[in-house]
Amino acid sequence: MSRHQQQLATALDALDRAFASEKPFPVIGCTYCYGDEDLAALSGPLDLISDDLLCAVAAKVPSHWDDFPRLYRRLTPRIIRSAVTGRLHVDENLIASRLVAAEWTTWDAPLAGALHDVWAAWWRATLHSRPGPVSVRQTLSLITVATGALRPWLDIWTATRTHAADAQLAHFIDDVLVEYEITELHMGFYDEYDASAELLSWLLTEMRTRADDPRLDEPYLLSHLRPGTDAIPEIGEG
């Protein structure tokens, strides 16, 4: 296990410990989608909730639950660990949108801080490894929508000058240049975050010398390059 993968594992373990204070509570939800056994399982020990039930809850709209923020907060360690390792069969963009709906940044500082530490560790582990179970684009999309900021994560990528980071860059470019998607690229399940201007400016200026892709010189793309947006405050280490 690489140093960055170890740091991610440590952050995930810390997330478990931080959320251990979230005790079981009687879950009330949509009885059309969930039977009594499902609701009883969600009201019991976290480790006894099946993976299938976890996925179902992670994907459902908040209106399915009487107390969606509390339920999602309690399930967060299981959801995030499964998402990071590619074992949660739910769109990563949807996870980000659900976390925003659960207002994770307003949770108690130890909880929000532990989750932010996972974002930072996951992103660095992604940039220091070859494409894994979750694509670099999906990882970037999830943490961008969850934190409401793209630029800090791009800055980390710019500063990570390794073969793995450049390989991920080539993979990312190949993904977003299909039919020039990058000119109208939104992140989040509900397209909450318009990433086009920031990404295109970053690729065509700061990262151009590291991207061996002639498509970035296409006049059509260059015509979409416009002055960058106001600087976004850096995201700290948590």
Image (spheres, rainbow, N blue to C red):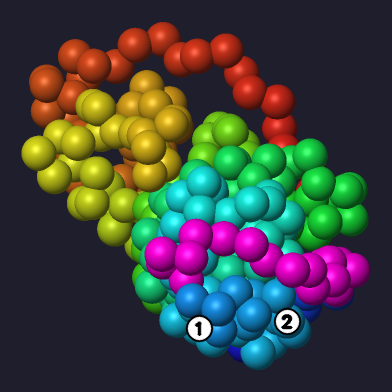
Which x, y percent locates residue 202? 42, 31
Q: Which marked residue is nearer to the observer: mark 1 or mark 2?
A: 2
Question: Was residue 148 drawn as part of the magenta stretch in this picture?
Answer: no
> Which is more toward the observer, 167 or 119?
119
Q: What is the magenta segment's predominant secondary structure?
A: loop
User: Left or right: where does residue 55 sit relative to residue 7?
Assistant: left
Q: Determine the CA span between mark 1 and mark 2.
A: 14 Å
Which x, y percent locates residue 167? 36, 62
> Which is more toward the observer, 115 or 154?
115
Position above or below: 116 against 13: above
Write down the quadrant of residue 100 in the picture: top right
Mark 2 residue type: Gly
Q: Which disc is residue 44 wearing?
A: 2
Q: Residues within 10 Å of mark 2 (few under 14, many from 20)?
A: some
Q: Residues within 10 Å of mark 1 (few under 14, many from 20)?
A: some
> Which is more toward the observer, 112 or 33?
33
Q: Which disc is residue 2 wearing?
A: none
Dot 2 falls on a residue whose secondary structure is: loop
**What residue is rendered at 23% in x and 16% in y?**
224
The span shown in magenta is 18-34
Upstream in sequence: badge 1 or badge 2: 2
Residue on which disc 1 sits? 51
Mark 1 residue type: Asp
